[in-house]
Amino acid sequence: MQIAILLYERLTALDAIGPYQVLSRLPGAEVVFTAVRTGPVRDDTGALSLVADAGLEQVQSPDMLVVPGGPGQFALMDDGPLHAWLRAVDASTTWTTSVCTGSLILAAAGILRGRRAASHWLALDELPAYGVEPTGERVVFDGKYVTAAGVSSGIDMGLALAGRIAGDATAQAIQLGEYDPQPPYDAGSPTKAPQEIVALLRSHSRFILEG
């Protein structure tokens, strides 16, 4: 099973690495990091590079596509070669997925039209412009399309997919080896965080999402 993870400048690293850590443990998984050009790709901090080993033209029919989010998403919203590639590979994927604002990239390519999707909570209002129904759920399945909310939810998405693909026992074994979240604060969503913190992030939402 080939799993293609899209890389681009100023992505959020955990959006790509979270699903990778889970999905790469699946039996028979072959993960390929792909980008418009091969080589290192800087994350949204500028301090970390991930390496694209394959150009888009080298990845023609992956079984699964993972599109991470991040501030670099804003530069990828216009139709062009990347969107054409996304539509082409989506035609034959078993699963087309995204994390955080990666769903906006899929939406802009027309792939999520008429479907329900998750995204970072600060970006949910952008989805209806592309004919997509936003939802505040952490992981959303709509047919073969699976979208996850902000950043760390990509790990949950990976586990949910692992269960669908390889069975609950395999997914649970992967989780046991990797993931037992116990955050020190229960402030990870606008419904749970202190409202003054929510207001602060909303007031700086463009800066937060664009970096």
Image (tube, grey):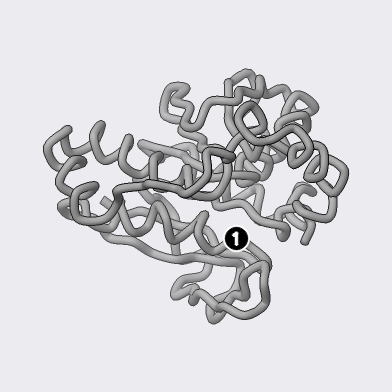
x 81%, y 37%: residue: 199
Q: Residue 63, image x and y in percent?
A: 34, 46
- Residue 119 position, x and y percent, is 62, 37
**131 in relation to 68, above or below:** above
Q: Residue furthest left?
A: 169
Foreground: 191 or 66? 191
Tell me if 64 is positioned left or right of 129 in this view.
left
**Secondary structure type for disc 1:** loop
Q: Disc 1 marks which amino acid? A: Thr
Q: Identify the image quadrant of the C terminus.
A: bottom right
Q: Position of residue 27 (x, y in %)?
A: 15, 52
Residue 78 image point, x, y percent: 79, 49
Residue visible at 66% across and 20% down in the picture: 133
Residue 171, quarter of the rendered image: top left
* Left or right placement of residue 46 versus residue 162 in this view: right
Horizontal side of 52 relative to 19 (left or right) equals right
Q: Is residue 207 above or below residue 161?
A: below
The residue to which callout 1 is attached is: 12
Tell me: residue 156, above or below residue 112: below
Question: Which residue does the image show at 17% across and 33% down from the upper left?
Answer: 168
Give the total number of marks visible in the rendering.
Answer: 1
